Amino acid sequence: MGNGIENFKHMKVQIISIGNELLIGDTINTNAAWMGEFMTRLGFEVTQVHTISDERGLIKQTIAESMKNSDVVLCTGGLGPTHDDITKAAVAELFGAGLIVNDEVLEFVKSRFEKWKIRFSKSNFGQAEVPSNCEVLFNNMGSAPGMWFFEDDCYLACMPGVPVEMKFLMKNRILPKLQEQFGNVGFLHARYLKTVGIGESTLSDEVLGDMSRFYKNGVSLAFLPFLAGVTLRLSGQGATNKEAEESVNKLADYIYQKAGTYIIGEGKDITIAECVGKLLKSQNKTIATAESCTGGLIANELTDIPGSSDYMLGGIVSYANSVKMNQLHVSEADLNTVGAVSKEVALQMAKGAAERFGSDIGISTTGIAGPGGGSKEKPVGTVWIGYWSRQDHFAIKAHFTKNRLINKERSMRVALEIVRRTLLGIKEMPYNMEKQLP
Amino acid sequence: MGNGIENFKHMKVQIISIGNELLIGDTINTNAAWMGEFMTRLGFEVTQVHTISDERGLIKQTIAESMKNSDVVLCTGGLGPTHDDITKAAVAELFGAGLIVNDEVLEFVKSRFEKWKIRFSKSNFGQAEVPSNCEVLFNNMGSAPGMWFFEDDCYLACMPGVPVEMKFLMKNRILPKLQEQFGNVGFLHARYLKTVGIGESTLSDEVLGDMSRFYKNGVSLAFLPFLAGVTLRLSGQGATNKEAEESVNKLADYIYQKAGTYIIGEGKDITIAECVGKLLKSQNKTIATAESCTGGLIANELTDIPGSSDYMLGGIVSYANSVKMNQLHVSEADLNTVGAVSKEVALQMAKGAAERFGSDIGISTTGIAGPGGGSKEKPVGTVWIGYWSRQDHFAIKAHFTKNRLINKERSMRVALEIVRRTLLGIKEMPYNMEKQLP
């Protein structure tokens, strides 16, 4: 059994994104990133993305040049019913093909319109026209059909630029075609290990150490930092998906062994709230929040997770001091002496939330989000996070940034990471911050 | 006074984004959108964006071809200290220039490192090397200098791909150079009018009507839909910024006259929470929230605005029925008969929040966010939004989607839009939804 690298075909893909809104910055090109990831996972090599205006000559030229140097070209945009949607005409011209009304498409589009209760107007007939040399890719998500061409030893797909329509066509129409045409082009397997509460350099230099022995036969590791954490992308190649998977598993095993406590889960999109939710559910525990500087963000993150009503009992957003006193039984004396941004108040808020909602755990934040309100002793970015359960209560002091939204976001992430670690019995707190007992 | 269009020079710009992380979809190319907007506002025409891998031949070829067809080429990425950062070497090779250590850059980088208390290692010397034919653009935000070239009648800027560094160089180093080299290239002025609570087609067909008489001399209007609203982009051109401004003002005046009540403010980034915050402040009113299906999102949005502690007194996230009863005095009988997702409970929650926190206004949401929990009578996406003030109390029933996060987001937007309209004395509710009195 080889590792399959010698069979890796390195099929090349180029992506063409058409639309003025992309060039003038009104729309960020998320389609290209999504297609890039999709094709990379299938083992294709994405070599270029071209973003161009709705201009006939440029569309023709870019498609023609991309097809010369690629096995597959994926093109989005310019397929709508209005006058500036000219991709279809440009492609027909490039291939010297006429535009013909495809009856099947016409029926399909008409039936869509009926379903949506929209009147089928004359201008919609144009949507049923396709170049005579294309194969239609039926689009269940919209009225503009996708198109599939094979010319000069290269496949070309044209899709609408609406993300949900593009994604539908990629998954349901183009993926089967790619598998049919290219068979197994080799697979690239990637695992995303998401860590929270440790800096990139500490993770790399002190926790993981030298890992060069793993980097062979196409196995690689990338550090992708995000707010309050680092995602590790492990990738490997193989002639089968299984081979590709196995090639990264050794590296993953090593990372789990060295850095397992920092990993909240796998997948680019996993959130700390999802991870905390799973732990609460499995341990049959409930939580409540008392938020000052995060202003509802922790509750919002927790309730983004389907089924969170099982463990998230409720929360209080206590912006005003009077709310802290009346709703959470924070001591007026403490508010007057040590102030709202203090260990004492953070602890009382966490306890107050747990008691008020009858939850096992209370989590609180109180801090100076900014831009105003800072002082020499408590500059903007100073945040206390309180944790309360019957077994354990403590607070942690953090110093974040001068930016209000970043302070809210980081406070939320660190607070939930504290919950995660405490639920797992991990003694070390995020970023080695110190537990401060009452 | 002409409108300056005849002097509009139409200087062409191409953008080159270098980096494998962009092609495989790990990073979304937000830099290109930002630069596109920046250059468009200065009156330049962005014709293409090329996203390419860190490959020497491709970098050289793409830069050379872009320079042939442009007045300015902006290039980001591949300037870091590691082995896969090869932009500098590729550019030097393209221009047949040597790499020389620039003493001023070396001192600059060293002083940066001292300030950040980072050890200056041997590999950092490489960062002070630049092609001999470039002018250095000092980068106060990082250790990699920017570079400015003039070859074959085209300007080329090379910048690091880190967004904060790129933006610093664009604003502080490249903008003055463009103004010096091109003088006044003509200006494009854009105004973004953000509307909420009305659909794109109703706004276009029924409220605004035919506006073709405004579309001359480069004036144009684009509809950019977002969740629960539509942003109108009005743009115009002129030889001076003032001329460009004036060219769009007539169109803007007409739109305000016809659709003023739907406009929450100007600017792409303005939020409904910001708009509501300003109104509350100017009317000296306070608000409190009682959130079930939005789970803290309304409070979070309101507290994203600096100074919101002046009018946002607090909120309750009442996920559990027991919380609705105990914290908000929702009637147990109503919960048992009409259920938590009902007009009655929405109204009681809004009133409960206002009373508990002593605010002028209480706003509430109760609904089925999904994916589970729906029934035939109350499918997923059914949401009641309650409003309470001493003068006015009502609830509104909305039907959103099957997607949990979209339902949370739309409920939040519609709830805040209801507050905005009520504060302004606008009788019509978002999307013509009906006020239901107690």
Image (cartoon, coloured by chain):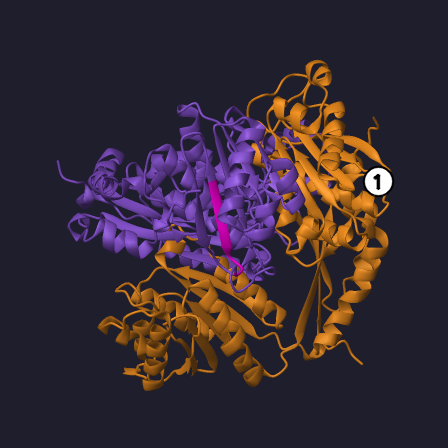
Chain colours: A purple, B orange
Residue A419 image point, x, y percent: 42, 37
Q: Is residue A403 magenta?
A: no
In the picture, measured across the screen, residue A427 lies left or right of residue A85, that is left
Element class at badge 1: loop
In the picture, measured across the screen, residue B286 lies left or right of residue B400, that is right
Look at label 1 and name its amino acid. Answer: Glu
Is B289 placed above or below B374 here?
Answer: below
Residue A204 image point, x, y percent: 27, 53
User: Looking at the image, which is closer to me, A258 or B126?
Assistant: A258
Is B137 placed above or below A155 here?
Answer: below
Is A44 placed above or below B82 here?
Answer: above
Residue at 39% across / 75% down in the picture?
A: B145
> Which residue is labeled 1 in the image?
B428
Magenta range is A379-386
Q: Is residue B261 visible?
A: yes
> Mark 1 Cα within 10 Å, few/some/many (few <14, many 20+)?
some
Query: Which of the chains bears the disc numbered 1?
Result: B
Q: Is residue A385 magenta?
A: yes
Q: Is residue A151 visible?
A: no
Q: Quadrant of residue B336?
A: top right
Residue at 47% across / 71% down in the picture?
A: B74
User: Looking at the image, which is closer to me, B236 or A392?
Assistant: A392
User: Looking at the image, which is closer to me, A309 or B324?
Assistant: B324
Residue B316 image point, x, y percent: 64, 35
In the picture, measured across the screen, residue A72 lies left or right of residue B274, that is left
Residue B377 image point, x, y percent: 69, 17
